[in-house]
Image (tube, helix red, strand yellow):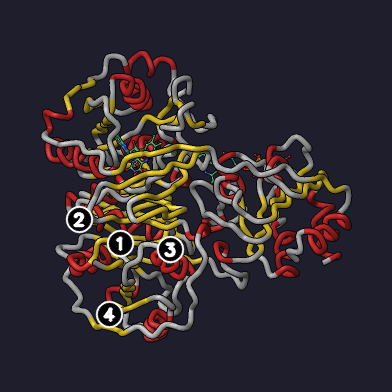
Amino acid sequence: MKILIPIKRVNDYNVKVRPNQGNTDVDLSNVKMAMNPFCEIAVEEAIRLKEAGKADEIVVVTIGDDKHQEQLRTALALGADRAILVKTDNSVQPLDVAKVLVKVYESESPDLVIMGKVGIDGDHNQTGQMFAALTGLPQATFASEINVDGSKVEVTREIDGGLETLSAEMPAVVTTDLRLNEPRYASLPNIMKAKRKPLEEMDIESLGVVVEQKVTTLKVESPPERQEGVKVETVDQLVDKLKNEAKVI
Amino acid sequence: MRTLVIAEHNGNSLSAATLSVVEAAKKLGRDIDLLVASNSCESVLEAAKSVEGVSKVLNFSHEKFKNEVAEDVAACVMSVSNDYDFFLASSSTSGKNNLPRAAAMLDIQQISEVTDIIDEKTFKKPIYAGSCIATVQSTQAKNAITIRTTSFDKANENGGSAAVEDMSVPETESRKSGFVKNELTVSDRPELTSADIVISGGRGMQNGENFALLEAVAGKLNAAVGASRAAVDSGFVPNDYQVGQTGKSVAPNLYIAVGISGAIQHLAGMKDSKTIVAINKDEEAPIFKVADYGLVGDLFEALPELESKL
Ligand SMILES: Cc1cc2nc3c(=O)[nH]c(=O)nc-3n(C[C@H](O)[C@H](O)[C@H](O)COP(=O)(O)OP(=O)(O)OC[C@H]3O[C@@H](n4cnc5c(N)ncnc54)[C@H](O)[C@@H]3O)c2cc1C
Ligand SMILES: Cc1cc2nc3c(=O)[nH]c(=O)nc-3n(C[C@H](O)[C@H](O)[C@H](O)COP(=O)(O)OP(=O)(O)OC[C@H]3O[C@@H](n4cnc5c(N)ncnc54)[C@H](O)[C@@H]3O)c2cc1C
């Protein structure tokens, strides 16, 4: 079985991102970048499937500029076999990411596509579902458990009311949620080895996808700050404030 | 052109989230139709047509809708898409699952988690765990939007008298997935995203049994119980308790955070609450920066005392 993992380069989740001076975009100039945490979970799951003898090849793909090689190398160091960089200097919105992934899917013919449920930057939560729609593949989003059984994959999903289990014929698209696994760290020898693993590059134009900015950003602002409140000394004071000042109980 | 709202329900009642989406839809100034895909669910249809502001209820009834599969819902949307230039759902796990699938089939770049509708092409949405708010503009003729329900009021549940139109249910072209089972959390507490008061516990709770302390306070206040990611990851409570960037967004009148440090991802899901209380033994905890009332102390003493004084 072959697994395709689309990964995304985003800000390190510990960094608080701020608007730029002109409020035209976010300021990422000195921000530490990393692999999207949900994509790390996707890579980890693929490696576990390979370790369990259920998968034999893991291909990672990302769409972006040359700097995105870093995240591909990280994925290779973790255990992916091959990497593809679809090169573009423009920001690509989820629908176009999905269209590019369709091209990669067609040339790679994987049995399973595992991706993050959401990028922690744009907070869209769309790409997997869109990719599934465009390929006509079944989708199982927000996975907290994946069981591959022959030609089927059974996925437990985290939904608002609790958990739901779906079964899908492969090829299928699965997007990861937080509880799926705890990703490992790459070891130093594996980081060295990853440098020799194949990383193929192609231009987005060569895939015939026309990237459009169908949604443009007019302004990026900080949200209104909350005023820091007061400390109360006792539970009695707290109850009093809630009853008589805030009037919420 | 009209606005189509995908209704959410549990097979029994219409979700409060849908009322907020209808209210948001009113800002687009079009006739609003509700798409209800259900297993001939009379109570949901009845509720749908009573929502103030709804013109028409599109009744897609079929046994397969007993459990919702994105492929089926997207096919319903596609079957009526010509009449609409706006497609709305809430940013619940259901809306997030269904709407992007339909949007891609319509070649629409969706706009997610909208918190404000400025005009029919211009929207506000949080990005980067709520640390920035982007104003975005669509250049598209048709748009698909998920609504962050905590940012909008609820449309009146009564006062509407929409016509119910029976629709022919489209075949889902070669659907390759199927429902296996549900393990829904049973609780007699109010629902987290629509409760007036929410009390959440974090890693400081130490284990699942100790959540009984929170439950006791919640009982007195008729509050919903939530949690941080750390508490869910540690198995103290089920996944559907998680509040935050990648869990649920809540904005109750009162939010009480207990044994929660206040990581940006947690704040992203609750900092729009009207009044915030933090109980934490570390006076430097970042949660105090957003709290209206902070109590520095041991939660194992504070919670029983709080319960006894309510
Ligand atoms: C200030 C600002 C505002 C923006 N506003 C909007 C907006 O309103 N609408 C809009 O469409 N875009 C917007 N963008 C662009 C957006 O942030 C992303 O560049 C792009 O939309 C991808 O989104 P995502 O990763 O959040 O998608 P998601 O759907 O959240 O991503 C889920 C998964 O898709 C895969 N994936 C995503 N991107 C890639 C990639 N490049 N290569 C490989 N796999 C990938 C990964 O597996 C990822 O985990 C904005 C950007 C900025 C900076
Ligand atoms: C991709 C990603 C997504 C995430 N999404 C979310 C999300 O949606 N929601 C979310 O919550 N987190 C999310 N997180 C995790 C987040 O970064 C924090 O790790 C998490 O919120 C910490 O939970 P906590 O505050 O319960 O635990 P901790 O940070 O460990 O804090 C525990 C607190 O309890 C206090 N405490 C301990 N004992 C006592 C006592 N006896 N009495 C009083 N106080 C006590 C301590 O002082 C401390 O402040 C996400 C992280 C990532 C990387």
Which residue in the structure is indicated by mark 4?
A: B61
x and y, in percent, of residue A188 in the image: 43, 16
Image quadrant containing the C terminus of chain A: bottom right
Residue contact at pointers 2 and 1, CB within 8 angstroms: yes
| SS for callout 2 | loop
Which numbered tag is attached to residue A48?
A: none
Compared across the picture, whether A107 is left or right of A155 comes to left
Decide if residue A3 is in sight here. Answer: no
Residue contact at pointers 4 and 2, CB within 8 angstroms: no
- In space, the residues marked 4 and 2 are separated at their CA atoms by 23 Å
Q: Amino acid at mark 4?
A: Ser
Q: Which chain's residue wears label 3?
A: B
Please tell me which of labels 4 and 2 falls first in the chain.
Answer: 4
- In space, the residues marked 3 and 2 are separated at their CA atoms by 22 Å
Which residue in the structure is indicated by mark 2?
A: B106
Mark 2 Cα shell of 10 Å, populated few (<14), some (14-19), many (≥20) = some
x and y, in percent, of residue B262 in the image: 65, 42
Q: Report the number of numbered marks.
A: 4
> Quarter of the image holding residue A67?
top left
